[in-house]
Amino acid sequence: MNQNLKTEKKKNPKALITAFATMALLAMIPMNAFAAAQVQGKINNLYSIVTTIITAAGAIVLAWGVFEFASAYQSRDTAQQTDSLKKVVAGILMCLAPTIINLLK
């Protein structure tokens, strides 16, 4: 039986080579992939998630800056007032970041 298998392998090497060559040639045929819309959709989803996170962080920084400014104003600490105003401006910029990016496009 083992000798029978050897004779079968010797009979079909050209068919096997032809099959592999055909598969290799078929793999080289260019095919259109219509996935641009899916990729663009995923990028837009990622963009919306990132802008939402930045806007939420900006709202937190803005509220923190306003609270610190009120405390500094009450205690009449000018250095702390300046620092808190910087936080307020940074929070406003973070909240408006998606709008600014859309204007730059």
Image (cartoon, helix red, strand yellow):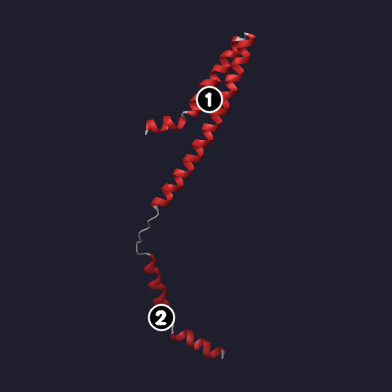
- Decide: is 25 above or below 72: below
Residue designated by label 1: 91
Q: Position of residue 10 (x, y in %)?
A: 46, 85
55 or 90, nearer to the observer? 55
| Mark number displayed over residue 14 | none
Q: Amino acid at mark 1?
A: Gly
- Decide: is 3 above or below 64: below
Task: Name the residue at 54% across, 21% down.
Answer: 88
20 or 48, nearer to the observer? 48
69 or 26, nearer to the observer? 69
Residue designated by label 2: 15
Earlier-in-chain disc, 1 versus 2:
2
Position of residue 70 in the picture relative to residue 42 (left or right): right
Dividing the image into 4 quarters, which one contains the N terminus? bottom right
Badge 1 vs badge 2, beta-carbon distance below 8 Å: no
Position of residue 64 in the picture relative to residue 13 (left or right): right
Task: Name the residue at 43% across, 31% down.
Answer: 99
Q: Position of residue 39 (x, y in %)?
A: 43, 50
Q: Amino acid at mark 2?
A: Ala
